[in-house]
Image: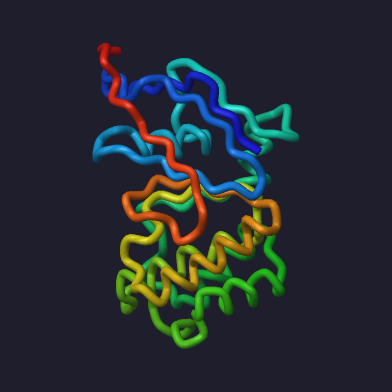
Amino acid sequence: MLTLASLDLIRGGRRLFAPVSLTLAPGEAVVIAGPNGAGKTSLLRAVAGLLIPASGEIAFAGFDDPDRARAEALHLHGWNDGLKAARTAQAELAFWARWSGATDDHLTAAVDAFDLHPLLHAEVRRLSAGQRRRLALARLLLPPRPLWLLDEPLAPLDAAMRTRFGEVMARHLQGGGSVLAAAHDPLPVPHRTVTLQLAEEPA
């Protein structure tokens, strides 16, 4: 589904990590590990097309055009939830459904998956950090896309919701989807770990 070949990133004149190569197969979850500042978030942003690598290759199976793959085949869930504080949870979901072309069935599945029914009429500003994260994660199902890029998705979730999100991820993987996550906490699904090595040479 995804191949990184000798990927090299430079930010602020600093090489973030030693060149990274990995493959991510359908049905597989990979965790990108490493200390703070190692470049985990930057790697996800490069895969999503938000950062330009200094060198190396990012390829998506089934797509000759990486930009088309990013538009049609992946979801990026960043550390910042990117929610509008003045909207209700329901209005926020409706906006994302319209923007992404999701169907009513997708919207219903997202609400059910993250138990959002009690929150729909609350303003986003009134939600706790964990509730906001649930609302943001629901966008992964609006509509479903095969590749999920997740940046510390578990951090504000309680134990029960981590288990529920694990069930959502498991269904995604069983359906042939893939997950690439930057995370300090282990994902609640079977996964492989790739640890970034700090670059030994300056940029």
Rendered residue at 68%/63% (across/down): 102
Left or right, residue 109 beside residue 11: right
Residue 31 image position (x, y, % from top left): 44, 45
Q: Quadrant of the C terminus?
A: top left
Residue 68 image position (x, y, % from top left): 68, 36
Rendered residue at 35%/69% (across/down): 157
When the figure is inspected, residue 121 is found, relative to residue 140, above or below; the finding is below
Residue 134 image position (x, y, % from top left): 44, 70
Residue 113 image position (x, y, % from top left): 56, 74
Left or right, residue 1 beside residue 86: right
When the figure is inspected, residue 37 is found, relative to residue 77, above or below; the finding is above
Q: Which colour scheme appears in the figure?
A: rainbow
When the figure is inspected, residue 181 is found, relative to residue 61, above or below; the finding is below
Q: Nearer the viewer, residue 85 or 63?
A: 63
Q: Quadrant of the N terminus?
A: top right
Rendered residue at 52%/77% (across/down): 90
Q: Nearer the viewer, residue 167 or 127?
A: 167
